Image (tube, rainbow, N blue to C red):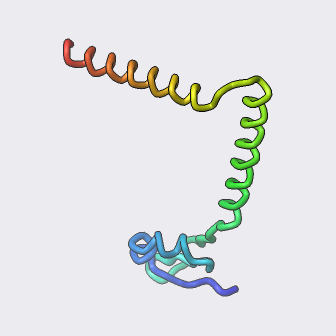
Amino acid sequence: MEAITVGIREFRADLAEYIAANMPVAVTRHGQTVGYFIPAHGQAEAHLAAMKKASEILDDLLTGRGVDVEEVVSEFKAVRRASTGKGKTGAKSA
């Protein structure tokens, strides 16, 4: 697979496109190659698979201990609202 050659300014301007592409990019400055960019698409799938596995393990642990996930989420939201409210009140009175 051959690399696309682009200047550093073009590379910076179009970085999102190069990330989405499946081709290596040779980055040049004043006509000299200063580096290569190689998109790593395969890692996203590996990270997603790891997160799914971790989620399954967590679900099994919670179910095994009789924990109601909806109750935990509700408690988390309540604590977060309370701590956010305290932070705002404290900031106003200072």
Give the camera-side residue of 83 and 9: 83
At horizontal 48% and vertical 75% (from top left) the residue drawn is 17
At horizontal 73% and vertical 24% (from top left) the residue drawn is 66
Residue 48 higher or lower than 25, as above or below: above
- Location of residue 12 in the rendering, given as x and y in whole percent from the top left corner: 42, 70
Give the camera-side residue of 83 and 44: 83
Q: Which image quarter holds the N terminus?
A: bottom right
Residue 31 higher or lower than 56, as above or below: below
Residue 32 higher or lower than 81, as above or below: below
At horizontal 39% and vertical 19% (from top left) the residue drawn is 83
- Location of residue 77 in the rendering, given as x and y in whole percent from the top left corner: 46, 27
At horizontal 43% and vertical 25% (from top left) the residue drawn is 80
- Location of residue 49 in the rendering, given as x and y in whole percent from the top left corner: 73, 54
Give the camera-side residue of 70 and 4: 70
In this rendering, would 64 be left or right of 70? right
Looking at this view, name the residue that lies furthest to the bottom: 2
In this rendering, would 75 be left or right of 61? left
Looking at this view, name the residue that lies furthest to the left: 93
Q: Which image quarter holds the C terminus?
A: top left
Total marks placed: 0
Residue 19 higher or lower than 1, as above or below: above
- Location of residue 57 in the rendering, given as x and y in whole percent from the top left corner: 77, 38
Which image quarter: residue 68? top right
